[in-house]
Image (cartoon, rainbow, N blue to C red):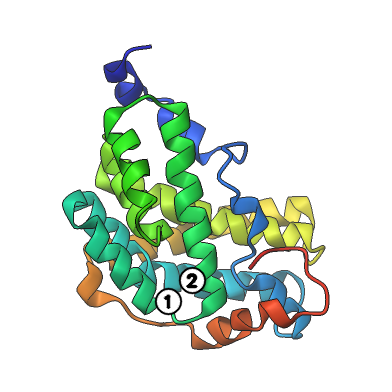
Amino acid sequence: MTTDAIVDSPWLVWQIADSAFPTGGFAHSGGLEAAWQAGEVTGADGVRQFLRQALGQAGRGALPLLTAAHRTPARLGELDAIADAFLTNAVANRASRVQGRAFVSTCARIWPLPALTDLDACARGLRGHHAPLAGAAGRALDLPLDTTQRLFLFQAARAIVGAGVRLGIIGSYEGQRLQFECATVLDAVLDRCGDLDERDLAQTAPIPDILQSAHDRLYSRLFQS
């Protein structure tokens, strides 16, 4: 397949959105595991509330960096440094770096695009945070900005729902219903935050952030974050 065929393929987004896409996102609960062990999340209603907060935070704490990197990939180093300064929670900071580098490395291995190879090389010299790298990768794959934003938010929602299922808080069918229900939340987040950039970063979910920061001190844990 030619390079042009890769970026023009309508199946590209579906492949990235597939849970089989090997970026390691399944290893992270986004703080849900710590919140559950602390007794702050119980049952489907608890996961639903946590998911809404997590998506709201993704809209104000990650999406602006993705948007800025997609619009101006040349600023990736600056935006990565901003992400590193913004993520003061050590657990969330580490998870962002692990997922960001894994995502770009995976894309570069799968699709032989010079822009992705260059991005992967650049990421090795950075902290490598997920949001700005996802934005730059979307641009390198010639994905429209709104598609890149939707993909990022969908993956954030799926990670929380999937973690809830693996932790046994909710069942598989319940998780899928919850994923469907959050479509309106995703639309609202995108509508509210889609045009924001790094100057608009904000912490909107301080309690989940505090709970996630305790993840490394859990007696036993299934997830990395």
Quarter of the view holding residue 21? top right
Q: Which amino acid does label 1 sit on?
A: Leu
**Whether residue 44 is visible:** yes
* Residue 34 image label: none
> Extreme top residue here?
1
Q: What residue type is labelled 2?
A: Asn
Residue that label 1 marks: 87
- Point 59% across, 82% down: residue: 213
- Point 35% across, 58% down: residue: 126
Quarter of the view holding residue 12? top left
| Callout 2 touching callout 1 (CB < 8 Å) | yes
Where the N terminus falls, by quadrant?
top left
- Point 17% across, 51% down: residue: 74
N-term-proximal mark, 2 vs 1: 1
Cα distance between the residues tagged 2 and 1: 5 Å
The vertical placement of 61 against 12, above or below, is below
Place of residue 36 in the rendered image (x, y in percent of width and height, measured from the top left):
74, 77
Residue that label 2 marks: 93
Secondary structure category for the residue under label 2:
helix
Place of residue 119 in the rendered image (x, y in percent of width and height, measured from the top left):
31, 43
Query: On the picture, is 77 further left or further right than 127?
Result: left
Place of residue 115 in the rendered image (x, y in percent of width and height, measured from the top left):
27, 34
